[in-house]
Amino acid sequence: MIESSKVNKILYGGDYNPEQWPEEIWEEDMRLFKLAHIDIVTLNVFSWAALQPDEDTYDFARLDKIMKMVKDNGLKVCMATSTAAHPAWMARKYPDILRVEHNGMKRKFGARHNSCPNSPTYRKYSVALAGKLAERYKDYDNIVAWHISNEYGGECYCENCEKAFRGWLKKKYGTIDELNRVWNMSFWGHTLYDFDDVVLPNMLSEEFAWDGIRTNFQGISLDYNRFNSDSMLECFQMEYEAVKKYTPDIPVTTNLMGSYKPLDYQKWGKYMDFISWDNYPGYDSYPAQVAMQHDLMRGLKQGKPFALMEQTPSVSNWHIYCKLKRPGVMRLWSYQAVAHGADTVMFFQMRRSIGACEKYHGAVIDHVGNENTRVFREITQLGKELDQIGSEILGAKEDAKVAIVFDWDNWWAAEFSAGPSRLINYCQEVGRYHRALSEQNISLDFVSVDDDLSSYKLVIAPLLYMCKDGFDEKIRSYVKNGGSFVTTYFSGYVEDHDLVITGGYPGRLKDILGIWVEESDALPEGEANSFTYKEKTYPAQVLCDLLHLQGAEALSNYESDFYEGMPVLTCNRFGEGKAYYVATASDEEFYKDFLGGLCKELEIMPVADVPEGVEACERINEKGSYLFLLNHSAKEQRVLLEKAGCDLISGQSYQAGDSLVLSKAGVAIVKK
Ligand code: GLA
Ligand code: ZN
């Protein structure tokens, strides 16, 4: 959420690039924005070339005009700092700004997200520009947020980064002996004598032997990922400081990308005033998959509302098939974002550009240039509704009793691992658990290993390959005090540096789970074992742990192969609570049944009883509770309301026991 006294409704707008258009068009844009009930624009995302045409010259004349026009038209501004793509002169004059790719190739000018995060030139000029913008526009009271850079991402393997990596390591580990220990450099005689021996892990060094995904030394690659994420975070923080100097009260964000692997967003979240992110589901994404991204982003700030910074009104040009969002779907997905915690709904982009790779990306204003399009009409309808909803919902939070643990370090480490299976996919495994809960309309939060668990009845840590220092203790006391904990195969193997915890898997979690995993059998795609739980039979796939009970009880056993009869699903009473172990990956049915049953036992109720294909979410603030009903199915649906309430969109009141009709792609927000 863009938290500011200047905001009293769900803001509605998007990325606006008037600099790509002659001024005559601008007034027409203003007319169309008004028609569509647009009240915010993100300005200045890619304007560095114009704002700083050479090293010593800054030129704000055009931005001044745009700012004045936008203000005169009553629009709020999310002000970008323009530093996601550097100007051509800078690349020509200061090649240190250009990135080096994973394969060692030095880039030339071109593309975007193209600056080396450790380039002194980049840091100097990006911070200078951010500061100048803040100084110049600080008195515009319609600026409601700063948008630093744009979708930070990628990586760099240049000499500047290598030098900075050595410094980062020295600070973290102190001595070369400690570095050799945590990276296990006695393996293959890779012992380093000096920090100057450190090289970046890419195709020129440790990441060539497999296929660029796997590495010879997981510890090095892991630290590189941490370092790369930190390097970009430092760039963000430096610009953050530069704008805060002039506008201490304007909240600052940068647009994130959901489960984007290279950046540790949980760490980033700590330094952002509010979370914003860009939602571009694939043409074949299912609703729970999108919900998972929203939930993950909401979790970065412990449930605080976020901004949906970008979504396409119709198509994303970069998908392999640019399938249209069906009538009503843009509206449905916008409300889905709100249902999961968004307090701002924005598009990329306001007007379709005419050249380069995004000219066929969806926009509020299409190439036809007027309001007579299906997309514009749908945008207008949603705009009207958001006006009508007003300040309701703002600041509302979910009340979840289930937490799913997500951890970027663990993600990196699990997927760097050489063995036991190339089918091991962290987000997919997390998604299996998330989907089962989400499709049963059970509220859940994503938490990091640093978050407090005490308010949850059930904590699920899928594929917790890396169990970090102290996290086992957190789980231990959580379960002892009555919590329920679920974890899976390939968990508890390593500590923070990807060094194996000896003494048997799952390492530090052994006593909590009451088991010992002796071996793991990786099944090729298409192969499966099976197990029966509560009279239903499910497949066991990907990895099958061969485990022994050490206090736990077996809830189900494998049904074939040489480990037939060994436990596959276990439960251990530990203190006042219970710890479950799922020793394999199964199918959708299993997760639904297993987690559904567990929730029932723990009296964790779905937010509403709705037909299949309808998603239900609840948000609560001091004004009341809001039940979101979202019809993702292809037909009309009826929902029986348990409690009386009023639909904020249609204005219709309902009594307890009434049924509410949702048309295809229909939405209701029932305030109780
Ligand atoms: C990203 C960027 C935008 C635009 C869109 C297109 O989200 O932030 O500038 O390129 O993708 O989908
Ligand atoms: Zn670099």
Image: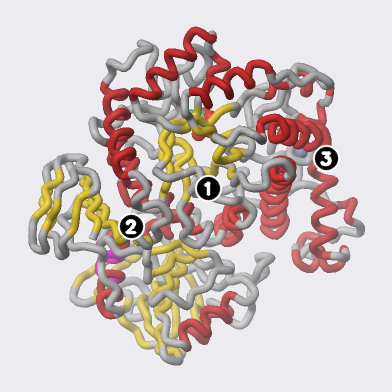
For residue 145, what is the image quadrant?
Answer: top right
Dot 3 beta carbon under 8 Å from ligand 2: yes
Q: Which mark is residue 435?
A: 2
Instruction: Label 1: state its secondary structure.
Output: loop
Q: Which residues are magenta?
A: 589-594
Q: Nearer the viewer, residue 197 or 25?
A: 25
Can residue 280 be seen here? The reply is yes
Closest to the camera, between mark 1 and mark 3, is 1
| Residue depicted at x 21% and y 77% | 534
Q: Position of residue 233 (x, y in %)?
A: 68, 48
**Which badge, 1 or 3, comes first in the chain's sequence?**
1
Q: In the image, what residue type sits under mark 1?
A: Ser
Instruction: Label 2: state its secondary structure.
Output: helix
Instruction: Determine whether, in the image, residue 34 is placed left or right of residue 144.
Output: left
Real-space Cα separation, disc 1 to disc 3, in angstroms: 39 Å
Q: Within 10 Å of the Cα at label 1, are there few (<14), some (14-19), or many (20+) other Cα atoms?
A: few
Q: Nearer the viewer, residue 510 or 272?
A: 272
Real-space Cα separation, disc 2 to disc 1, in angstroms: 34 Å
Q: Which residue is mark 3?
A: 160
| Residue depicted at x 17% and y 58% | 610
Q: In the image, what residue type sits under mark 3?
A: Asn
Check if mark 2's residue and mark 1's residue have beta carbons within 8 Å: no
Q: Quadrant of ligand 2?
A: top right
| Residue depicted at x 71% and y 47% | 237
Give the position of the C terminus as an image quadrant: bottom left
Q: Position of residue 391 (x, y in %)?
A: 37, 48
Q: Within 10 Å of the Cα at label 2, are there few (<14), some (14-19), or many (20+) other Cα atoms?
A: many
Q: Which mark is residue 4?
A: 1
